[in-house]
Amino acid sequence: MVSLFAQTAKDEVKDAGQDVKQAGKATGRAAKHTGRAVKKTTKKAVNKTAEKTEEGADSVRRKTNP
Protein backbone atom coordinates (compact mmCIF):
# COMPACT_ATOMS: atom_id res chain seq x y z
CA MET A 1 0.00 0.00 0.00
CA VAL A 2 1.30 3.44 -0.93
CA SER A 3 1.55 6.00 1.87
CA LEU A 4 -0.53 9.14 1.46
CA PHE A 5 2.33 11.25 2.81
CA ALA A 6 4.93 10.13 0.29
CA GLN A 7 6.57 13.02 -1.49
CA THR A 8 6.96 13.12 -5.21
CA ALA A 9 10.35 13.86 -6.76
CA LYS A 10 9.05 17.33 -7.64
CA ASP A 11 8.17 18.02 -3.99
CA GLU A 12 11.56 16.78 -2.84
CA VAL A 13 13.36 19.07 -5.29
CA LYS A 14 11.16 21.98 -4.20
CA ASP A 15 11.94 21.30 -0.53
CA ALA A 16 15.65 20.99 -1.30
CA GLY A 17 15.51 24.34 -3.07
CA GLN A 18 13.91 25.93 -0.02
CA ASP A 19 16.59 24.40 2.21
CA VAL A 20 19.31 25.85 -0.02
CA LYS A 21 17.59 29.23 0.04
CA GLN A 22 17.41 29.22 3.85
CA ALA A 23 21.05 28.14 4.10
CA GLY A 24 22.02 31.02 1.82
CA LYS A 25 20.14 33.48 4.00
CA ALA A 26 21.81 32.11 7.13
CA THR A 27 25.22 32.41 5.48
CA GLY A 28 24.45 36.00 4.52
CA ARG A 29 23.42 36.86 8.06
CA ALA A 30 26.57 35.27 9.45
CA ALA A 31 28.74 37.16 6.97
CA LYS A 32 27.02 40.42 7.92
CA HIS A 33 27.62 39.76 11.60
CA THR A 34 31.27 38.89 10.98
CA GLY A 35 31.72 41.97 8.83
CA ARG A 36 30.36 44.21 11.57
CA ALA A 37 32.66 42.61 14.14
CA VAL A 38 35.67 43.11 11.86
CA LYS A 39 34.68 46.73 11.28
CA LYS A 40 34.37 47.38 15.01
CA THR A 41 37.69 45.69 15.81
CA THR A 42 39.48 47.50 12.99
CA LYS A 43 38.09 50.84 14.12
CA LYS A 44 39.27 50.22 17.68
CA ALA A 45 42.73 49.19 16.49
CA VAL A 46 43.07 52.25 14.24
CA ASN A 47 41.96 54.58 17.01
CA LYS A 48 44.40 53.04 19.51
CA THR A 49 47.22 53.29 16.99
CA ALA A 50 46.38 56.92 16.26
CA GLU A 51 46.32 57.66 19.99
CA LYS A 52 49.72 56.06 20.53
CA THR A 53 51.13 57.87 17.49
CA GLU A 54 49.91 61.17 18.89
CA GLU A 55 51.47 60.38 22.26
CA GLY A 56 54.75 59.59 20.52
CA ALA A 57 54.59 62.84 18.54
CA ASP A 58 53.95 64.81 21.73
CA SER A 59 56.95 63.13 23.35
CA VAL A 60 59.15 64.07 20.40
CA ARG A 61 57.88 67.66 20.50
CA ARG A 62 58.67 67.94 24.21
CA LYS A 63 62.19 66.62 23.66
CA THR A 64 62.95 68.83 20.64
CA ASN A 65 61.34 72.03 22.01
CA PRO A 66 62.48 72.36 25.60
Image (spheres, rainbow, N blue to C red):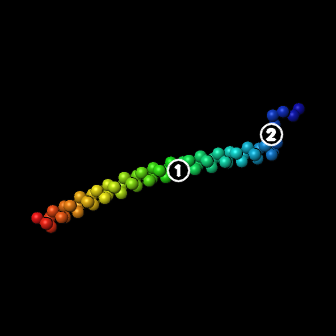
Percent coordinates x, y for residue 13 in the rendering = 76, 47
- Residue at x 27%, y 60% (from the top left corner): 53
Q: Are marks 1 and 2 in contact (CB under 8 Å)?
A: no
3D distance between C-alphas at marks 1 and 2: 35 Å
The quadrant the C terminus occupies is bottom left
| Front position in the image: 33 or 4 | 33
Q: Is residue 13 left or right of residue 49?
A: right
**Residue depicted at 70% across the width and 45% down the height:** 18
Q: Position of residue 14 (x, y in %)?
A: 75, 46
How many residues crowd mark 2 within 10 Å: few (<14), some (14–19), many (20+)? few
How far across and how far down the image is residue 44, in percent? 36, 52
In the rendered image, the quadrant that contains the N terminus is top right
Query: Is residue 7 placed above or below 45 in the rendered structure?
Result: above
- From the viewer's side, name the closer residue of 15 and 50: 50
Residue 35 position (above or below residue 53): above
Residue lying farthest to the bottom in this orientation: 64
Query: Under tag 2, what secondary structure?
Result: loop
Tell me which amino acid carries mark 2. Gln
Under tag 1, what secondary structure? Answer: helix
- Residue hosting label 2: 7
In the displayed structure, does residue 48 sit left or right of residue 37?
A: left
Tell me where residue 63 sits by quadrant: bottom left
Closest to the camera, between mark 1 and mark 2, is 1
Q: Amino acid at mark 1?
A: Lys
Q: Position of residue 42 (x, y in %)?
A: 40, 55
Q: Which residue is mark 1?
A: 32
Using a 10 Å C-alpha cutoff, classify the residue at mark 1 as few (fewer than 14 neighbours), some (14 to 19) or many (20 or more).
Answer: few
